[in-house]
Amino acid sequence: MSWPPIRAELAGIEPYGAPQLDVPVQLNVNENPYGPSEACLDDIASSVREAARTLNRYPDREFVELRAGLAAYLTRDSGDAPITPEMVWAANGSNEVMLQLLQAFGGPGRTAVSFAPTYSMYPEYARDTNTEWVAGTRESDFSLDLEKARALIEEVRPSVVLLPSPNNPTGTALDPASIGALSAAVGDTGILVVDEAYGEFRRAGVPSALESLATHRNLVVTRTMSKAFAGAGLRLGYVAADPAICDAIRVVRLPYHLSAVTQATALAALRHTDELLGNVDALRAERDATVSWLREQGFTVAESDANYALFGMFPDRQAVWQGLLEHGVLIRETGPDGWLRVSIGTPAEMDAFKKALLEVTAR
């Protein structure tokens, strides 16, 4: 018998993670290139110091104040129906939120569905919770064919449907009409999760799924502070849903899973929302300019409502990725064969990327 006695389906599997390399231009994990201001840093530091006074005590396991702050923020995108604190849950990144959803609504004898190409962690959440995984496919432009999607859901009868909007790694936003149709297809036997990790970067006129929460009780919308909020190191993800769904998640959460330091930092960041989101418009413009430039060079580029662009096609994408790395530019080798993904950085970082790409591809 091999050692250690790990579950058979986990044996030999490498843990998830993008390369962490110390290079001048890092454009591979969709981080916000603009950090918080000195004023925000001072607020975080003083808030954490205050929280440290009671580190000998457990934190508020229901993080009531933070849920209220997140609810107020989400209400900006929810249309006519406000988000209440009872409709909000948070965890250590939207990854933990997703895992908790699979723990609560997936499991043995249950199925999770998504449509490839999509976020590579989804099947791992299913695997880790012993949930059967079924992946449909997207169209050639990475959009979702509503009739095909509905047919798969009606055939499989999943307990969880995972739909990122914008989709990772393609950047494709979900057609708003699909939310109502797919929510109805899922019905009362499951939940429809719209993952809006990159939702703040969507283009003008693209609504948030938060607007549909009031009319679809099986709808769950997830967000994160890692991207638009420039809080990748904070590890704070959150969900808006019917209070009954949030209560179900509470059953599977670990005790005191959000530290006092995390709660204090997140609350301080929320007090600086306008500042931290102040660069979103600039990143959108840089994304659109990058997409246009890539197309002008003859590359195929997926439509993007996120802070990254998926582009190709390359007979040997690994060689292009390696060539860029040798020029000090790190992007991501992900998605379908032949494609690469570049995160949107500062203008200087994007200039370095463009120069390196032209040299590597001899254009």
Image (cartoon, helix red, strand yellow):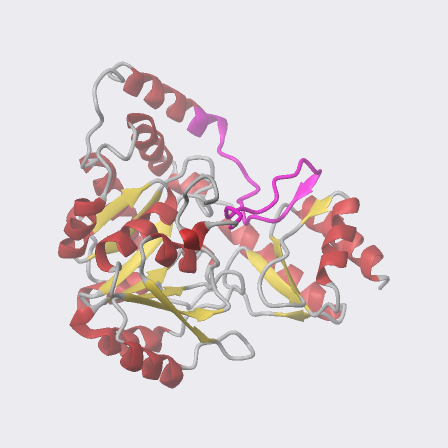
Does the segment drawn in magenta span residue 33?
yes
- Residue depicted at 28% across the width and 26% down the height: 260
For the N terminus, the quadrant is top left
Residue at the right extreme of this rendering: 362
Is residue 9 found left or right of 291 in the rendered image? left
Question: Is 150 placed left or right of 184 in the picture?
Answer: right
Q: Closer to the camera, 99 or 80?
A: 99
Residue 359: image location, x then y, percent: 84, 56
Identity of the residue drawn at 56% across and 48% down: 29
Q: Position of residue 182 (x, y in %)?
A: 29, 76
Say above or below: 82 vs 209: above
Q: Quadrant of residue 189?
A: bottom left
Task: Please state which of residues 57 and 136 is positioned toward the viewer in this rendering.
Answer: 136
| Residues in magenta, as a range | 13-41
Q: Going by the picture, which residue comes out furthest to the front?
A: 1
Residue 349: x %, y % from top left: 69, 45
Residue occupying the point 73% across, 51% down: 353
